[in-house]
Image (cartoon, rainbow, N blue to C red):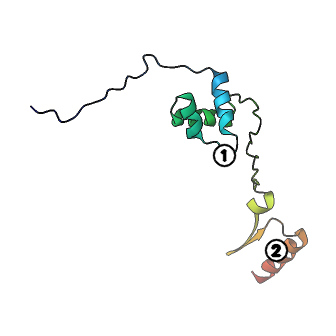
Amino acid sequence: MEAVGFVELLAAPAVKRRWSDEAKGRMVAETLVPGVTVNEVARRHGLKANHLSSWRTLARKGKLVVPEVVGAEFAAPVASPIVVPTVATMASIDLIIGPVTVRLDSATPAARVAELAVALRACS
């Protein structure tokens, strides 16, 4: 057989590292400084970027405490308006006189409802 090349084996860490919540919080805080990327912080601390991203998600959900870091910028919360259906948009008034049905919005004034009921009764 002929030697084609060589293979370099890289040793993996012997034990799985465990990061304290404080250390995770500090690393997440570093990613909040403008111009700093998640990959850069992960490389500096010798961990995978996806681990740091998952810690950022925990911090966003309030499950990881992030200390204040000079220059860090937190995203401003964005509030979207919540549309709650009102009685006027949900309910309606049905006038049923004989075979005729008239559906009115619940915001229709009572006087108008009475006028329509009288007119429908006169027509039937």
Image position, residue 116 (x, y; %): 82, 77
Instruction: State which quadrant residue 35 falls in.
Output: top right
User: Label 1: which residue?
Assistant: 35
Residue 112: percent from the left, percent from the top? 87, 74
Q: Residue 23: x percent and y percent?
A: 64, 24
Q: Residue at x 37, y 22 (%)?
A: 11
Observer able to see residue 91: no
Q: Please determine whether, in this image, residue 97 is positioned above or below residue 12.
A: below
Which sits in the foreground, 3 or 90? 3
Distance CA(mark 1)–CA(mark 2): 70 Å
Write down the residue under mark 2.
117
Is residue 98 shown left or right of residue 113?
left
Give, as a three-letter code, the residue at label 2. Answer: Ala
Instruction: Give the quadrant of the N terminus.
Output: top left
- The residue that appears at 65% across and 33% down in the rendered structure is 28
Q: Amino acid at mark 1?
A: Gly
Q: Residue furthest left?
A: 1
Residue at 74% x, 42% y: name it.
74
| Residue farthest along the bottom direction in this orientation | 123
User: Can residue 50 be seen in this snapshot?
Assistant: yes
* Residue 12 or residue 2, whichever sits in front: 2
